[in-house]
Amino acid sequence: MTEKQVQVKREDIDSKDSSYSGVAGWVEIFMRRFRVVFHCMALFVVYILGAICMGIALVPGVYLFIYILEYTKDWSLFLRYAAIGSSISAGYLLYGFSLILIVPLVNFLFPLRLKPWRGIYYSLGTIPWYIHNALTYLVRFTFLHFITPTPFNIFFYKMMGMKIGRGCMINSTNISDPCLIELEDKVTIGGSATVICHYAAGGFLVIAPVKIGKGATIGMKATVMGDVEIGEKAKILANSLVMPKTRIGPGEMWAGVPAQKIQGTENVS
């Protein structure tokens, strides 16, 4: 792509028009001409969707609470309150495990699929990204910490479309765009590490996949951004930042902000 072509795209960041025709074109034009209004509308839809998911997930816990409330009405106050308190705690766990089933189902039923993409924020192409991550974050911020790292968080990410090989360990909830992430066998994602497949570039939103090779390790609190490929048995040291478009070879060790190679290829056989 030439500099002139790049410049043309940059000038269109604030475009109020659309390249689509028909209904899609009118919707995108509305998005771009009434950005605040559309953003508020989108938030409202996401909040309603989240409330429905959470409400359904709460059903088993509500049932348990009401059952215990009725069952213990003749008990002493201490025992009754202890039972009610336990039912509330158990209800939260039931909510969480229900949520990691319901959210992937809603994500699957959503008609638009998240794909690699580049464009301005107020575009139809951002809608799948917006919904997919909103659903992911709903689980992250209400329950996922309690099942990380366990087979249950691996299960959740797989159900959200993340490709995960055998023997992987994900000790972090800071995962965005899971359906665009691929982990080969025995990959380790360290505590509080971040893997995120989207980033901003010159006013554009860029959505690009991340692939992490067999036996690779992402250190604690390291960040891996979109359009990154990490080779087999490579190591990203703690607190490092792997920038977009980085290609890390098999057995290499990288560190720093931004991350740079500090050790060459090792024997990965």
Image: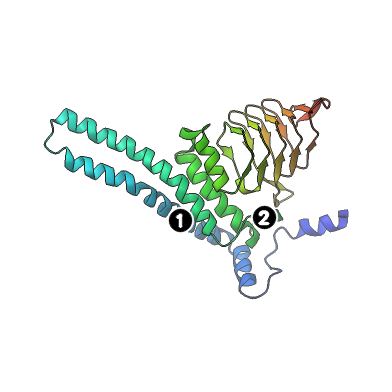
Which label sits in the foreground, 2 or 1? 2
In the rendered structure, the answer to whether residue 187 lies left or right of residue 267 reads left
Seen at 68% across and 38% down, the residue is: 184
The extreme bottom residue here reads 22
x, y (%) of residue 261? 81, 28
* Count of residue discs: 2
Pointer 2 or 1: first along the chain: 1
Q: Is residue 128 above or below residue 241?
A: below
Identify the image quadrant of residue 80: top left
The quarter of the picture where the N terminus appears is bottom right
Marks 2 and 1: CB-CB under 8 Å? Answer: no
- Location of residue 163 (image quadrant): top right
Tell me residue 206's x, y (percent).
Answer: 70, 50
Pick the residue in front: 126 or 7.
126
For image coordinates 65% across by 71% down, the residue present is: 25
Residue 49 is labelled as: 1
Q: Is residue 254 left or right of residue 223?
A: right
Label 2 belongs to which residue? 115
Q: What is the x, y in percent for residue 227?
A: 74, 44
Give the residue at x 48% y 50%: 103
Q: Which residue occupies 42% across, 42% down?
A: 97
Residue 217 placement (x, y as % from top left): 68, 29
159 relative to 169, above or below: below
The amino acid type, in three-letter code, at marker 1 is Leu
Mark 1 crowdedness (10 Å alpha carbons): few <14, some 14-19, many ≥20: some
Q: Please state, as top left, top right, bottom left or bottom right, where the C terminus lies in the image.
A: top right
Q: CA distance from mark 2 to mark 1?
A: 21 Å
Three-letter amino acid code at the position of disc 2: Lys
Q: Is residue 185 visible?
A: yes
**Which quadrant of the figure has residue 4?**
bottom right
User: SS class of the residue under badge 2?
Assistant: loop
> SS at mark 1?
helix
